[in-house]
Image: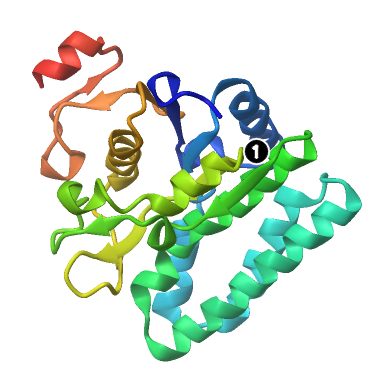
Amino acid sequence: MVAMSDLVVVKYGGSVLKDAGSFRAAAEYQMSRSPVALVSAPAGVTNQLMDIYDGKDQSLLLRLKDAYWEFVKDLPQKLGAQTMQELEREVEHLALYLDIGARDAFVGSGEGHAAIILSSHINSLGGNSEFTRGPDAIFYLNGHGLPDMEKGRESFGPVSEKLERGKTVVVGGYLGRHSTTGQHKLGARNVNDAFAAALAGALGAAAVEIIKDVPGVYRVPPEFGNYGLLEKLSYDEARKK
């Protein structure tokens, strides 16, 4: 097991998880870098889930299965079949969430699916990986959808236990549990970066790496106006923001 003082939590944005090749590249990097990863949903999946939920059209879930097959079809045959079976069970849960009106659990499921896929790609390269979803990790969120840092410091036992068994742990973000009710709750915008920081803090990790394919960093969230895009930002400058 990696010493916690040397541990790095690597967070992958959905923009870099867009096809089978990018999942394999992430798996290769993860095996060389760290036993802990946190993932966003694959590119476009969260928007697809929102569209399905808003339209209440279960037939569109078949397209989601087809999309996931493209991510796993290059895995070794047995592992690919096992991974697809796991994803098909996840899609069956989506149909149930749709029926009962569990929007947060429905829309936030893509991150857990990405964790399944990345974990399988790591295992295909000879790794020893297990996935876990945000609500099982456990990420706690306050009423505003932001990480409850105080409660979170003592809530990552499932991740620690897997690390102690020598596993590479891939955690799905975005979806957590309400810190008061314990119900599934979606995080706020860009919460996965904060989840990665919360996980690193709880584990005593040395650093967090955030990997995204983006043109830069907005000075303020773009919904508040066009205040410019920073193409470069040093760590010292970021600390001052």
**Res. 56 in view:** no
Q: Residues within 10 Å of mark 1 (few under 14, many from 20)?
A: many
Q: Position of residue 38 (x, y in %)?
A: 46, 41
Q: Amino acid at mark 1?
A: Phe
Q: Is residue 43 left or right of residue 193?
A: right
The C terminus: image quadrant: top left
Helix, strand or loop status at disc 1: helix
Using the image, determine if residue 228 lies above or below residue 179: above
Q: Residue at x 32, y 23 (%)?
A: 216
51 or 126: nearer the viewer: 126
Q: Residue at x 29, y 44 (%)?
A: 190
Q: Is residue 171 left or right of residue 20?
A: left
Res. 232 image quadrant: top left
Q: Residue at x 19, y 39 (%)?
A: 222
155 or 11: nearer the viewer: 155
Q: Position of residue 136 (x, y in %)?
A: 43, 61
32 or 241: nearer the viewer: 32
Q: Residue at x 34, y 34 (%)?
A: 200
Q: Position of residue 134 (x, y in %)?
A: 41, 57
Reading the image, the residue beneath label 1 is 23
Q: Residue furthest right?
A: 77
Res. 170 image quadrant: top right
Q: Position of residue 29 (x, y in %)?
A: 61, 24
Q: Residue furthest bottom?
A: 99
The N terminus: image quadrant: top right
Identify the coloring: rainbow
Q: Is residue 32 left or right of residue 44?
A: right
